[in-house]
Image: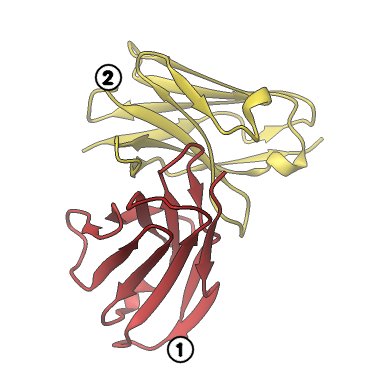
Chain colours: A yellow, B red
Amino acid sequence: QVQLQESGPGLVKPSETLSLSCTVSGASISGYYWSWIRQPAGKELEWIGRIYTSGSTNYNPSLKSRVTMSVDTSKKQFSLKMSSVTAADTAVYYCARMRRGGQLEYWGQGTLVTVSS
Amino acid sequence: DIQMTQSPSSLSASVGDRVTITCQASQDISNYLNWYQQKPGKAPKVLIYDASNLETGVPLRFSGSGSGTDFTFTISSLQPEDIATYYCQQYENLPITFGQGTRLESK
């Protein structure tokens, strides 16, 4: 069974960089798109971007200037970095596997990141 | 970006009721439309893909229809475990975008 697990600091100071990793188990990481999605409390889902196992990326234009994604196939991990964070970046961050049809079929449990001094 | 507009934003229904949620895209997305269920404190779960295809293991009371800009999600007979928030999501163009969600409550 495919499982994803997010990890990283739950508290980040304003203007600093948010860094999260997602570890994949139960399946190969190769040959898939891997996405990051976030959800502020009580609000809708926002797609941050995706990375293919080749390293090719697509980012949401609204966040593109601050986001970097990477993948380490040997560790079965992919990562998100978001720079210059503000309180507006406080949210639950999810990682997910994306099928070619755009369905986000497997999700991590989510990790709450709070931006506060 | 393609804007996805769901309605209603919330609704109350009783067990056994037929529930319908609509999703309208700001431009033609063919059938590149998925529906998700999210329960409090949990990650979303895909129920319907490509507008009308039921994800493996999802009960038959869930269905979807539509193409182009107008889509419908239906629960034929509401069960207690269906109380959740439902989201549509388009994949015609990047960035992927979601509707604002429909919160389904028990009457």
Residue A111 as seen in the image, left or right of residue B45: right
Q: Label 2 crowding class (10 Å Cα cut-off): few <14, some 14-19, many 20+?
A: few
Q: Chain of mark 1?
A: B
Residue B3 as seen in the image, left or right of residue A108: right
Front position in the image: A74 or A30: A30
**Figure quadrant of residue B71:** bottom left
Residue A70 as seen in the image, left or right of residue A88: left
Q: Where, quadrant-wise, is the C terminus of chain A in this rendering?
A: top right
Q: Chain of mark 2?
A: A
- Secondary structure under tag 2 reads loop
Residue B51 appears at what percent x and percent y? 30, 57
Residue B43 in sight here: no
Residue A40 appears at what percent x and percent y? 63, 50
Q: Which mark is residue A30?
A: 2
**Residue at x 22%, y 28% (from the top left corner):** A27
**Residue at x 36%, y 69% (from the top left corner):** B72
Q: Amino acid at mark 1?
A: Lys
**Residue at x 62%, y 55% (from the top left corner):** A41
**Residue at x 39%, y 21% (from the top left corner):** A77
Residue B13 in sight here: yes
- Secondary structure under tag 1 reads loop
Relative to A25, does residue B51 appear above or below in the rendering? below
Relative to A12, does residue B103 appear above or below in the rendering? below
Discs 1/2, front: 2
The residue to which callout 1 is attached is B107
Q: Residue furthest right?
A: A117
Q: Amino acid at mark 2?
A: Ser
Residue at mark 1 to residue at mark 2: CA–CA distance: 46 Å
Q: Label 1 crowding class (10 Å Cα cut-off): few <14, some 14-19, many 20+?
A: few
Front position in the image: B21 or B38: B21
Residue B94 as seen in the image, left or right of residue A117: left
